[in-house]
Image (cartoon, helix red, strand yellow):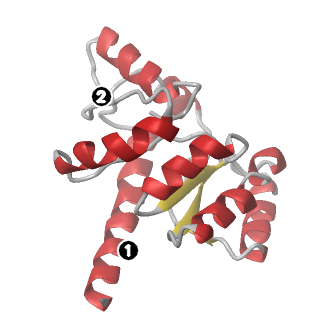
Amino acid sequence: DADPQGSASHWAQLAADSGRPLRAAVVKMPDPRTEMPRRINSIARDNALVIVDSPPPGDLHNARAVIEAAHRVVMPVPPQLADLARVPPTAALAAEYGKPVRAVLTQVRGGLGERAAALELLRGWGVSLYQAELPLTVAVQRAYGYGLTAGPLLRFGVDLMTEIIKEETDNASNT
């Protein structure tokens, strides 16, 4: 958890307190600029997959440290203009470091035109998208603070990870 908001750490603590802990270790990194380069390698040695919850690119120093340490950049983004505005600077930072980058839509509300508008913007910026999308539902909103055993948030995570693993496998076989 490299985001100053600490939402991943907070979620993990709430889940542990509820008796339904997350099935992943969450490590708080108060200062990614100094801790990320040193700690990411030791964390990666003991884990098959490391996901970094990072700040948006408005916090360029922290975002830069996270992107530099990353193997790939996945940008979860709601289809609202204020959130979409953060995509181009993040994609530019990823390109600066030669990291593959893709967006994934989150908080998608059915029946509204914002999804289509977001897709058009992202494609216009040349940003690739994952197929998985996280709907904005009551079940998703209520999942915060609990370990996931079922529901749309877990399904989204499985679908997204399946796409990422396939992408990694395809890239490995092409090299």
For the point 35% across and 53% down, which residue is it? 158
Residue hosting label 1: 167
Query: What's under tag 2, amino acid-wise?
Result: Leu
What mark, if any, has residue 93 been given in the picture? none
When the figure is inspected, residue 71 is found, relative to residue 135, above or below; the finding is below
The residue lying at 61 percent from left, 69 percent from top is 96
Residue 48 in the image, given as x and y percentages of width and height? 21, 53
Give the image quarter of residue 154.
top left
Residue type at tag 1? Glu
Q: Is residue 24 above or below residue 127?
A: above
In the image: residue 73, left or right of residue 96: left
Q: CA distance from mark 2 to mark 1?
A: 25 Å
| Residue drawn 34% across the image and 30% down it | 26
Q: Secondary structure at mark 1?
A: helix
Would you say 169 lies left or right of 91 here?
left
* Crowdedness near tag 1: few (<14), some (14–19) or many (≥20) residues, C-alpha within 10 Å: few
Please provide percent x and percent y for residue 173. 26, 87
Closer-to-camera residue (165/100): 100
Front residue of this view, candidates 64 and 9: 64
The answer to which image quadrant residue 93 occupies is: bottom right
Viewer-closest of 140 and 123:
123
Q: Earlier in the sequence, mark 2 or mark 1?
A: 2
As drawn, the residue found furthest toward the left would be 46
Q: Are marks 2 and 1 in contact (CB under 8 Å)?
A: no
Q: Quadrant of the C terminus?
A: bottom left
Q: Quadrant of the N terminus?
A: top left
Label 2 sits on residue: 22
Residue placed farthest to the top in the image? Answer: 17
Q: Residue at x 68, y 40 (%)?
A: 59
> Picture coordinates of residue 42 (x, y %)?
23, 44
| Left/right of residue 50 with respect to residue 54 in the rendered view | left
Disc 2 element: loop
